[in-house]
Image (cartoon, rainbow, N blue to C red):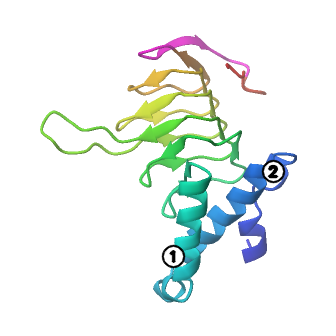
Amino acid sequence: MNFFAYVFQDWRANRGNVKALLVLPMFRLVNAIDRYMLLKVLFFWYLMFYRFFVEWVLGIELPRKLKVGKNMVFYHGQGLVVNYKAIIGENCTLRNGVTIGHKELADGTLSNSPRLGNNVTIGANACIIGDITIGNNVSIGAGAVVVKDVPDNSVAVGNPARILETRFDTAKPTIVL
């Protein structure tokens, strides 16, 4: 994939979503810069601008070291917080107020961050924390607190999240808001 295609890989998936069309190419660019020390030195000013503008002004925490598959979509983005060690698969949708991160364990150490599969849809204000895996073709309801693994083709809702249903037709994921 050439550099231009890499930076704009989320463009088609976010058609009409002005904030995502602004933030995601900036994220992909900062993600590419972070791979090489020389680029980090040369574009230090851009790394600082990204952090200030995207995190402080827009309220969207997508760290430069975050691993995200192609066609990521987010709506609104306000209050979106993703830990840099999280892994997000392809064709994932995040809504406002979503938190994806580690948790503090009983011994005071921090757990690993969640790993999301492909085609995951996360409702507004959902919280996904801990060393867990969210399978492919999963929908997580608005306000859900997910602290355990969610299998493929499932819908998880509630606090703490429970599996509401498991789909067998995975042609199109159900969106639970």
Residue 10 at what x, y percent from top left? 75, 55
Q: Residue furthest left?
A: 107
* Amino acid carrying mark 1 in the image: Arg
Q: Is residue 139 left or right of residue 41?
A: right
**Looking at the image, can residue 119 be seen?**
yes
Residue 176 at what x, y percent from top left? 67, 19
Residue 113 at what x, y percent from top left? 39, 44
Bounds of the magenta segment: 158-169
Judging by the rendered image, the residue that carries numbered circle 1 is 35
Helix or strand or loop: what does disc 1 sit on? Answer: loop
* Residue at 59 percent of width and 76 percent of height: 46
The quarter of the picture where the N terminus appears is: bottom right
First in residue order: circle 1 vs circle 2: 2
**Looking at the image, can residue 2 be seen?**
no
Q: Is residue 156 above or below residue 38?
A: above
* Residue at 54 percent of width and 15 percent of height: 157
Residue count near mark 1 (Cα–Cα under 10 Å), binned few <14, some 14–19, many ≥20: few
Q: Residue furthest front?
A: 57
Report the disc number at residue 18.
2
Residue count near mark 2 (Cα–Cα under 10 Å), binned few <14, some 14–19, many ≥20: few
Q: Is residue 171 left or right of residue 86?
A: right
